[in-house]
Amino acid sequence: MKIKNAFLFGLVLLMVSFATVQPGLAQKPCVPTILPTRTLFVNWPQFHYDAAHTGCNSYESILSPSTVGNLALGWTYSDSQQGTYSSPVVANGAIYVGMGGGSINNPYGYAYALNASTGALLWRYQASDRIVSSPAVANGIAYFTTALPGTLYALDAGTGAFLWARHTGGYKPPAVLNGVVYAPGYGGAYGIVWAFDAKTGNVLWQYHTVGVNVASPAVANGVVYVGTDDNNLYALNATTGDLVWKYTTGGQVESSPAVVSGKVYFGSQDHNVYALDAATGALVWAYKTGANVDSSPAVADGVVYVGTSTSSYPPDYNLYALNATTGALVWKYTALDSVQSSPAVANGVVYFFDYDNYFWALDAVSGTLLWYQAGYQSDTPVIANGAVYVGGDYVYAFHLPNQ
């Protein structure tokens, strides 16, 4: 597809007010959109929306294929600290995001909470090292993970006050469900999947993998699903950490899985997108792309969305839409560079970044280009309450004009 002429957008001061902020709606798998009460604030509280990493907000009702072309920049946030920002999350009227830091002049990383309407700073916490992955927020606690050697911090979500910290050895996003934090880690000659009590930080269990590079876990129906660079996707009992099954691919599994409707979807560096039976690990289907699949898939309304990345020729710079039941190609969209970003879906629109710093929004049904912006790069966009939030050199919020 050819890129359309760039849209002209004016800089609009964000006027949205969440004066009546009620507790966020419970997260649920993506199904056809419903229309929530306008005063309810919808959360996107962890990497790829929920603990199952579905990547889809089924409550979005403001941004749609007919309105997303009018997106304009509402606010940006930056401070004097050096470095880049992680992908943000949204919880109860606040944006939570980490800053890279890690330079000679600034060796520390910082965790931030910002007002979701205005971008105003609510609090900032100095961590021991860079924060490069998405945080997670649950039950009034914000969890941030630093870069290697890897420390998981638990902070009061309202004040930023320190609660506890644990060395994990990992730096990928944690998942939080039912009072447990599941975090990837590293133990020298092996990888570790950790389970911590979410309130106290006490270790509940740990599981050692052969591969040392452990991806972000997904959790659903009492099972933790996690990939590693030993070419396996592991399924672990969420309560005990015991191995339920593992599935071996032909390449490293850096993609975080998505678990929807009894299937687990993930990518591998053997160029395949896989769908497995979530209970048994049996192969349901595999789709061969032309490149590594490190992107974490999003699943919505019976379609799996996932990107590819390659430095080989011919390149495969595509976002794929695959039938979730059969694996058949629905459509693919060619970007300008690798699509290592994890796509996100809301109300009929799929959003993603490419490595050439382009931010794209496509019609989720047809793959038609609806909107794009140059000069932005992030891992995963977040869509909630009529806004799109991304991290990069700054934190950015996009809204419709006059919203």
Image (cartoon, rainbow, N blue to C red):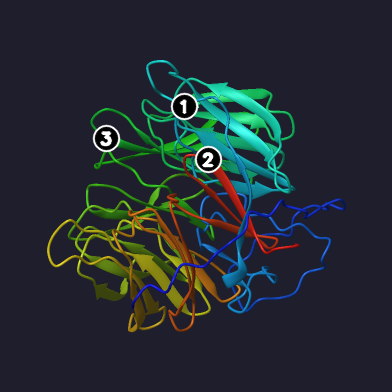
The amino acid type found where label 1 is placed reads Gln
Residue 197 rendering spot, x and y as whole percentages: 59, 35
Residue at the disc numbered 2: 394
The answer to which image quadrant residue 24 occupies is bottom right
> In front: 155, or 202?
155
Q: Residues within 10 Å of mark 2 (few under 14, many from 20)?
A: some
- Work out how far the residue at label 3 is from the one at label 1, CA to CA, in angstroms: 32 Å
> What residue did someone put label 3 on?
190
> Which residue is at a point 42% across and 50% down the rendered structure image?
377
Residue furthest out toward the top: 105
Q: How many marks?
A: 3
Return the x and y of residue 155 as percentages of the image width and height. Answer: 64, 29
Whether label 3 touches label 2, CB < 8 Å: no
Mark number for residue 82? 1
Marks 2/1: CA distance?
10 Å
Q: In the structure shown, which secondary structural element does the residue marked by tag 2 occupy?
A: loop
The label shown at residue 95 is none
Structural distance between the alpha carbons of marks 3 and 2: 35 Å
Left/right placement of residue 193 relative to residue 72 reads left
In the visual, does 27 lie left or right of 341? right
Specify few, some or many for label 3: CA neighbours under 10 Å numbering under 14, 14-19, or 20 or more: some
Q: Position of residue 340 (x, y in %)?
A: 34, 56
Q: Earlier in the sequence, mark 3 or mark 1?
A: 1
Q: Earlier in the sequence, mark 2 or mark 1?
A: 1
Q: Indicate the amino acid at tag 3.
A: Tyr
Amino acid type of the residue tagged 2 in the rendering: Tyr
Tell me what residue is drawn at x 47 percent, y 54 percent: 380
- Residue at the image point whose x is 63% and y is 65% from the top: 28
Instruction: Give SS at disc 3.
Output: loop
Which comes before the other along the chain, label 3 or label 2?
A: 3
